[in-house]
Structures are given as C-alpha cells and as structure tokens.
Amino acid sequence: MIEDEQQQENFQRLIGEATVLQREIDALLPALAATRRNYMKSRRDADRVEMERVQGLADDLAERHASLSDDLSKASGLSDEILEALDRPLVPLDSKNRLHRADLNGAEVKTTGSVDKHLADAIESVEKILPAGWSQAEAGAPHRLDALFSGAECLSLVKGLRPESEMSPLHRMRQMLRVSRDYLSDQPAYDHFAGALLVPQLVQLGTRLPALAQVGGDVSARLGKLTESGGASTDATILELLVAARCAEMGRRIEFLDETQERSPDIRCHDPFPLLIECKRKRALSDYEIAEEAAMRAIFLALEREASAKGLTGRFDLQLNVEVRPDLTPEIVARLVSQRLAAHPEQALQYEWGTVAYHPMPRCVSLPGVTRLYSPNMLSYVFDWDTDIPTWDGIVCHVAPGDALIDQVRDPIALVWNNSSEVALRRRAWSPLDLFGDAMNQITPGEFAIVYLAYHEGARAEIADRRVLRFLAKTKDEWYHAASIRVPLSFLIRLYPRALNHGQPDLIESTVPMCSGSYGYPRLADDFPKNVFTNSPGYRDITL
C-alpha cells in the first residue's frame, strides 16, 4: 500500500516514535494512579499539585500519541474506509462484527467445544467447595419438568426463558447442581430451559476453580457467597469469580477486596498499573417482563378453554400495538376464537388493539423423529418456534400429557405474541445503563477502574439491537461519572443461552469492549479477558 521508499521510511519512523511514546505512557500510568489515590485520601494541596503535574504529563503524552496516530493513518496510504474498519473495537477474533442479534446464532457462530467433556469433573470440583451436605438440602423443591409432562402446567417462554425455571424456589446453586446432574444422567424430565445457562455456567465455574488459587484476598469468603441468598445474587457472585479466575489465567496480579458498608469494589488488580475491577450482572427478567408474561399467560388460559370447547387445535398469532391490559382479555380471546370463521384464518385481521391470525392443526401431529416432549425440535416442528433467534416476544402452549420421549403430539394449542407498542418496546428494551451507574458508585474516589457488565439477552432481534445500541449511544454521548474516578475500559457481556435440538444446552457469549475516548487506553483491552463464560468472545459453548 505504501507507494515508494521515502514513504516507507517515513512510515517506519512514525511507528518507532509511536512505540517509544507508548512506553513512556506505560511507565507514567502507575505514577498517575498513585498520585490520584494520594490526593483523594489526603486532600492536601501539595498532593493536588503533584497529581495535576503528573496528569499534565499524561495529557501531553496522550495528545502527542493521538497526533502520531493521525500521521500514521495518513502515511499508510490506506483509505478512510479501511482505516475505520481497522479501528473498529467490536470485531471478535474471526473478524466478524456481531453487534447485531441476527449475527449471533447457531449457523453463524462457531462452536468451540462441548460441556459434555467437562461436566462430571466440574460437578465434583464445585461439590468440594460447598459445605458438607449442603447440596442435598431442599430435597422436595422442584427442579424438573414433571408438571409440564403431566399436563398440569402450560409452557410459557418469554425472552427465551421459562419463568418457573428462572425463578425456582430451589436455591440457585442447588438448582445448578441438580439440573447439571440431570443433564449428565440423561434424566427424562431434565429442565432444558434452565440447563441452557446453568449447565455451561457450572462447567465454567468448576474448571476455573484452580485459577482462583492464584488470586489474593479472602477467596474462601467469596466462594462462601455461592451458598448465601441465592437467585440473582448467586449468578452475580459467579461473575465475580469467573472474572477473577480469567484475569489470573492471563497473568494479572489480583485480589478480592473485603466488602464494607460503604463503596466496595470487587477486585483489586496490581498490573499493568493499580486499578479496581467492578462486576455487575442484571437479573434475567425485569419486573415489566414478568408482568407482561403473566398477562399473556392469562390470555392463553382463557383462549385454551374456549378453543377446547369448540374442538380447535393449532397456533394463534397475536400482534399487539397497545400495552396488554386485563380488560382487553375477553375481547382478544373472542377475536382469536372467531378467527376460525375467516375465509383465510392464517391471514391476520386488524383490530384497534392489534391483529390476530389462526393456523389450524390436526388433533394429532406426527413428528419427523423421536424427541423429548417440549424439546426445541418439537416446538419448531409443531408451532414453528425458533429457539435460536425467536421472531416473537413469547409463546404459551400446551399439548396432551405424554411420555418423555415422543414421536407425535396430541391436542396442540399455542399462542405466540408480539407487542410493538412504543411503550412496550421502550420498557422491554431496558438499557444496562442503570447497571453501569451502580458499578460507578462502587468505585473508590481517586481510582482507575475497569467495569464488567453482564446480562441475559433472549429477546427478538429488534428489541435486542435496540437495547445495545441505546446503551452504546448513551454511554458515548450522555453518560457522566464523578470526576474523582477514571474508567478507561468497560466490557458489556451479552449472554445468549438456549436449548437446541432435543434440549442440549448451548451458550453464546458476545462481549462488547468499550474504551473511553477522553482518557482511553486501548491496549488495556488486551491485558484483560473479553470473554468470561466461554473461551472466545462471540463464540459458543465451553472450550478448554
């Protein structure tokens, strides 16, 4: 690309200058971090003057480095389009930008390994760190799909999750172990909806435990949190443990920090310069999503009663343009049932609150092969439900009770639904920004810090893309934090757990690194793990 010898020499000279300058920046950063902490603790004028002096040196180096970067871009002879592509921070190892939901699916994302190879060892490793007999408690709490198989419950999925699986009365750690054992032993009533996340997560925890031996601080206390309150708290603790383990594996010198009543960051890292690491994980279902699913389940139960009385089986489609309300249920159900009388019931009819359609099915549907009851294969073949990338917000369905393994389905009925009202879209496409704010509030004044944010993403593409793009836009243009802290780098971890085929767990982890434009340090991203739950950002499953 570089046209002549003189241009080549100039290019090499600039590279040399940039390399020297980067070494100066690397050498200055520990001093900058130290002076900031000293002043924030003492508030003495002498410490403030020293901090400002070092900050001035750092600002000068940063300006010179930015100027050199521009000169290098011009001297390279590359087009602006190519330079922009090379500078894009969201491209994973295989050079494919997977920011959008449509690019994160089983066909596009490479499988890097299988949980089956490591699950037995991981279960044994995790059992060893738990109190003796702890995992055997709560013996009567449900963790399987028996109620579904018996016909006592309908199946309801929202954002790819079954609420009963996600909000189990069983302690989260016990649920994780029991679901994993069920998968390992091929238990017929294995909860593949819960296992999609819990099995890969347990494998990752179990296989990373040895790395925690390299971590300082009270590791035992942090492991002890796994058996405390449960639920989202357990998942959050697992994120902290996995981040610490992955950092240690990359050669970072780190330690867990004791929790206090005041600001209490999770981890202290001592290299490449002193900084804090704060981890936050959002619970999988928001209050709005839980309430919306409950409303749609109520509509389905009323619809099932009316449809059964008239001998109807099949799939009903509901597209709402308003927020669902209890007073709308009778009219919606009446319109869904009356759709059977339309000349073409599969073609949607418009009403003030949305559209309805009906796809009739025989009372007995033969499957192309043997599969598990309510498996992804069954849902796909009978109800055209895609567990990989759903095109609907949710499904509620019911079939006649049967054996765990089936080759036909009797009395199938389903309601698939979307809500495209602006209020519903806005509230369902919540941004992780509040999580970001919570993380910032934990960072001690005077410190540099890195933030890890993790959340479950199972929504259809429109909502998933709206969520991440809204977050990136707000953090770039509207987000401010206290001037007393510096956050040069953050990682947004999007988790896509879903069961595939006959119920096998599958996990995609897609990490979006974010480097501060004001005081960014792009090379820092190479010193810390971009992936935590898998071994390659944007890839599937577990590989070791």
Image (cartoon, rainbow, N blue to C red):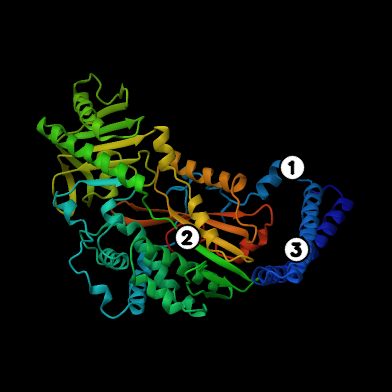
x and y, in percent, of residue 59 in the image: 77, 59
What's the residue at 32%, 67% (across, down)? 173
Image spot of residue 230 (x, y percent): 33, 65
Viewer-proximal residue among 296 and 82: 296
In this view, 175 is above or below 7: below
Residue sitting farthest toward the right: 6
Q: Write the residue at 58% across / 51% down.
A: 91
Q: On residue 280, which mark appears?
A: 2
Amino acid under disc 3? Gln
First in residue order: circle 2 vs circle 3: 3
Disc 3 and disc 1 in contact, CB within 8 angstroms: no
Amino acid identity at mark 2: Lys
**Which residue is depicted at the point 42% across and 33% down?**
422
**Numbered circle sitting on residue 79:** 1
Taking the image as drawn, is residue 524 in sight? yes
Few, some or many residues within 10 Å of mark 3 (<14, 14–19, 20+): some
Circle 3 is placed at which residue position? 55
Residue 498 at x, y = what percent?
36, 52
| Coordinates of residue 62 in the picture (x, y in percent) | 76, 58
